[in-house]
Amino acid sequence: MGLFDRLGRVIRANLNDLVSKAEDPEKVLEQAVIDMQEQLVQLRQAVARAIAEQKRTEQQYNNNVAEGNKWQQRAQLALSKGDENLAREALVRKKNYADAANTLKTQLDAQTNQVQTLKSNLIALEGKISEAKTKKNMLKARAKAAEANKQLQSTVSNIGTSSAMAAFERMEEKVLALEAESDSASELQGSGLEQQFAQLEAGSGVDDELAAMKAQLSGGAQPAGQLPSAKDTQSTSSSSSAVDAELEELRSQLKKM
């Protein structure tokens, strides 16, 4: 393979790729319909010309047939008058018109077939154009839907890395930090109250004990909450025995009286 052939193939390949990338389905479909409509106009013009030619040929054929019939009648008239030469001349004219009519008849038949073919093609092209318009609208709708879906998918795929999404994530982190600070402050406030009440309770016990000790020092009373010692217990037992003896002595004296 020659260098120029390879170079030409590379150029054609690049051009085809460039054209393929530049093709817009909507514009291509619009242009295709426009081209078909232009072809329809040309075909209609061709059909009109063919019909005009057919009518002209038909008129010429009818004129030649009429002229042939007229010379046929003249030949009969001349022969009836006994003018055989005039009758022969009339028949020659009649034959010329008949030959021309036969030629025109062949041409007319061909033109009639051509006109019928052109009319059939015209009807078929009109049907194809109508179908193409319907398909064009459908394909345009599908192309727009595909493009919209492509943009949506691109947006969805890029939303994770977008600045807006990053802003949401930052704000969420700040809210979480604020909530943590609020919970910590609540816990600290609760522990402070507990500590204050514990101090109050502890302080109350110390004050009570201090008051009891003051009372003991001033009045000899036993401090509140303090158990009696063994010495105090023995002293109390001795006092009870003396009282019982004295009571028994009184009972004896009463019996003697």
Image: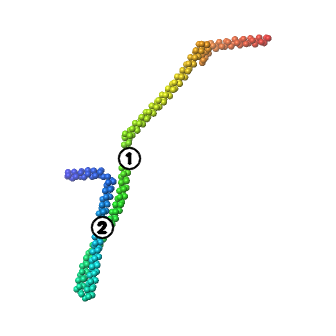
- In the image, which disc is placed on residue 48? 2
Q: Nearer the viewer, mark 2 or mark 1?
A: 2
Camera-nearest residue between 189 and 153: 189
Q: Quadrant of residue 166?
A: top left
Name the residue at 77% across, 11% down. 253
User: Is disc 2 in contact with disc 1, using a CB cutoff of under 8 Å?
Assistant: no
Q: Quadrant of residue 234?
A: top right
Image vertical order of residue 217 relative to residue 128, above or below: above
In screen coordinates, is 252 left or right of 217?
A: right
Looking at the image, tell me whether mark 2 or mark 1 is earlier in sequence order: 2
Q: Is residue 119 visible?
A: yes
Q: Mark 1 highlights which residue?
A: 152
Name the residue at 34% across, 65% down. 123
The tally of labels here is 2
In screen coordinates, is 39 left or right of 200?
A: left
Q: Is residue 110 visible?
A: no
Q: Position of residue 31 (x, y in %)?
A: 31, 56
Q: Position of residue 197 (x, y in %)?
A: 53, 24
Count residues near mark 1 (Cα–Cα under 10 Å), then give few for <14, some for 14-19, many for 20+.
few
Image vertical order of residue 64 relative to residue 9, above or below: below
In the displayed image of the protein, which residue is found farthest to the bottom? 82
In screen coordinates, is 74 left or right of 213?
A: left
- Mark 1 residue type: Leu
- Mark 2 residue type: Ala
Rounded to the nearest whole Å, what is the CA distance between mark 2 and mark 1?
52 Å
Camera-nearest residue between 185 and 227: 185
Q: Tag 1, which secondary structure?
A: helix
Q: Quadrant of the C terminus?
A: top right
Name the residue at 25% across, 80% down. 94
Q: Quadrant of residue 121?
A: bottom left
Q: Position of residue 223 (x, y in %)?
A: 60, 16
Camera-nearest residue between 4 and 177: 177
